Amino acid sequence: MTATATNQRAYNFSAGPAVLPVPVLEEVRDELLCLPGARSSLLEMSHRDKQFVDILHDAENSLRSLLGIGDDHAVLFLQGGAALQFSMIPANLLRGTGKSAAYLQTGTWGKKAIAEAKKEGDVSIAYDASGSNFDHTPGSGDYNVPDDAAYLYYCSNETIQGVQFQSEPPCPGSVPLVCDASSDFLCRPLDMEKYGILYACAQKNAGPAGVTVVVIKRDLLGIGSDKLPGYLNYKNHADNDSEWNTPPTFAIYVLGKVAKWLANDVGGLDAMEQANRTKASLLYDVIDGSGRFYTGHARPESRSIMNVTFTLPNDDLQSKFISTAAEHDLVNLKGHRSVGGIRASIYNAMPLDGVKALAGFMSDFASKNA
Amino acid sequence: MTATATNQRAYNFSAGPAVLPVPVLEEVRDELLCLPGARSSLLEMSHRDKQFVDILHDAENSLRSLLGIGDDHAVLFLQGGAALQFSMIPANLLRGTGKSAAYLQTGTWGKKAIAEAKKEGDVSIAYDASGSNFDHTPGSGDYNVPDDAAYLYYCSNETIQGVQFQSEPPCPGSVPLVCDASSDFLCRPLDMEKYGILYACAQKNAGPAGVTVVVIKRDLLGIGSDKLPGYLNYKNHADNDSEWNTPPTFAIYVLGKVAKWLANDVGGLDAMEQANRTKASLLYDVIDGSGRFYTGHARPESRSIMNVTFTLPNDDLQSKFISTAAEHDLVNLKGHRSVGGIRASIYNAMPLDGVKALAGFMSDFASKNA
Ligand SMILES: Cc1ncc(COP(=O)(O)O)c(C=O)c1O
Ligand SMILES: Cc1ncc(COP(=O)(O)O)c(C=O)c1O
Ligand SMILES: [Mg+2]
Ligand SMILES: [Mg+2]
Ligand SMILES: [Mg+2]
Ligand SMILES: [Mg+2]
């Protein structure tokens, strides 16, 4: 971090909206009153302005090149958050098809998606990890999906539980794979050919709140009915390059800068994954070496490299941990109200130094309070 | 305008996203890396953070006090733009009711809203101004609305045509009045008691793209079915203070600053209306005094004080007008592609000096080219 205006900044472990790269924030600040080459702020610029259209296409192309997204997928920038995707997916791919959609329920966000899907059609929960308090993802033989399912849906990283799929779950070739990647988007390379839809709200790993990226196979665009509310029909957005109506221009602009930072400063998604694994290991190593002072929530083979969740021996120690950490400039470590405990979200933009500081603090706190 | 970073700025007559107050942009810039009192940028702050919740409530309260919105209305901050409201309104208030919704069709945006409403139920076009190329709003005896209509819908300011209702259209007491105020929100005081729903995307008169304000009478919240996609149900947003899911935090933050600028710098909506009328008169006076060199699109009694639309004798002169104006730092004057001609959008944040400059340019251009 640079000094001056950043000197009140702390290491921010918020689960989202979450830490962004400081060089991106600095650029946004410097361009805020007048975008270079423009006669106004980006905030004041028509979405039809050629300069903004170029910004939108640049953001799209940065994502395409980071993830290796080919022409058979459209890349959309939508509003409504991930929660609107919970409905748009079944509204487009399930409603009126007479098919059943298969869901893997491995945490809170998948469960919410299922509740919305049930409003649109028949849903089968192909795997349900709720019985073990959502502490793991299924193994490959643990569930079945019929060949004629409308799609197979899963959440690659359950932000609240800190449970992450290590790779794509098996899925019949005839069935579109649909993934909520909100909290691990761009954390590692993916084989995008495997996905029917991969979507992510930006505010965890890719930008500010207000934009959701939807990568969708073009052959899925025609399934939704013309009778859908216009905003809910993916085809409208794809046909109009995300300008069916006014897109969230500022959020797209920031997301584009984050994608460029990933490509140029970090060196792409392989390098990013390696850095993320290094960071996550620092914390899991402290947990595993703490003689059960810290207890990880996720089973080791399902651990998230984005959200590290753990508990302390009792509530008093947890409160003390959170308040003492804040005094050490380590903030927003409280677990989600639905599960309690501690959650350290260490997204792409969390610097290694921040994680080192937290790991050091954890060791120190354990030795003083165990 | 101040010098330094603003010195490439021009007077921006864009219809939206559109001009914002420079003091607001300066504050946003100064706070971009670290929000005062916080340990991070606003862009990195959880929407559950108390400081952000306060910002959201402040924005709401500023709107309440500017417009005199009482407790019988909820104020919501939504994503999806005005276009999602085209669907949410009939999805909540028409679908499954067996009623018919009445629409006044006075321009392009009302027409688009009607197309979405027809997907949800029975629609009657109580007044249709398309026959006269959308150049006026109806008089009070020009249409009828049955007492049992689901609602009466109109667009208070048709942004593309530059046609504005001078006051609320007559509506039976039993029928909720629903208004798309996207392009004249906060341009003048309103009697909010008259409205069932008043909504506006922010990116014209109230902030950046990415947030839509919906003011809705609480007694309308229960009409929508539980089977609606969760995001589309107004009740979810009202019950959760616009945090049913992650709201567009940055857009709300900027909107809150614009509302404070209106209250403190401008002096409230009466003062704003007066300033807007002064600005609009400057342009309409040039049009009317130009000996038909400039032809206004709207009939005089339906003229908008936000979007001033007019044509020149031929296309060549229109192109020359636009390019010459740009050389004089007057930009984005091209009319919407669907109607052509010139459109000068002179929203709240357009300074009087900008309008004076445009009026002067128009007079000069007319005398040189007539
Ligand atoms: C995995 C996941 N899915 C969905 C959501 C919901 O996103 P939104 O609040 O944008 O609807 C979140 C977080 O908020 C999330 O972490
Ligand atoms: C009056 C009016 N209604 C609706 C819209 C559509 O708004 P959005 O693009 O946010 O859907 C606009 C402008 O874009 C408008 O001017
Ligand atoms: Mg491909
Ligand atoms: Mg914007
Ligand atoms: Mg009231
Ligand atoms: Mg934000």
Image (tube, coloured by chain):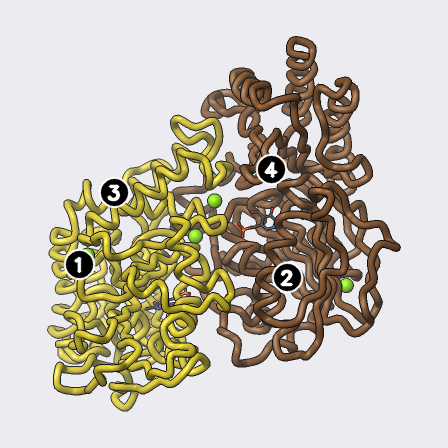
Chain colours: A brown, B yellow
Viewport quadrant of the C terminus of chain A: top right
Q: The residue tagged with tag 3: helix, strand or loop?
A: helix
- Tell me, yes or no, whether the two marked residues, 2 and 4, touch with CB atoms within 8 Å: no
Can residue B328 be seen in this snapshot? no
Q: Residue at x 32, y 87 (%)?
A: B124
Q: Residue at x 15, y 70 (%)?
A: B166
User: Between marks 1 and 2, how big is the CA–CA gap?
Assistant: 40 Å
User: Between marks 4 and 3, how big is the CA–CA gap?
Assistant: 38 Å
Q: Is mark 2 within 8 Å of ligand 3?
A: no
Q: Chain of mark 4?
A: A
Q: Chain of mark 3?
A: B
Q: Which mark is residue A339?
A: 4
Residue type at mark 4: give it: Val
Q: Position of residue A195 (x, y in %)?
A: 75, 61
User: Closer to the camera: disc 4 or disc 3?
Assistant: 4
Q: Residue at x 16, y 53 (%)?
A: B269
User: Between marks 3 and 2, how big is the CA–CA gap?
Assistant: 37 Å
Q: Position of residue A72 (x, y in %)?
A: 73, 68
Q: Position of residue A42 (x, y in %)?
A: 44, 50
Say whether residue B184 is left or right of residue B17: left
Q: Residues within 10 Å of mark 3 (few under 14, many from 20)?
A: many
Q: Residues within 10 Å of mark 1 (few under 14, many from 20)?
A: some
Mark toward the start of the polypeptide (2 vs 4): 2
Residue type at mark 3: give it: Lys
Q: Position of residue B186 (x, y in %)?
A: 23, 56
**Whereabouts is ligand 3, in terms of quadrant?**
bottom right
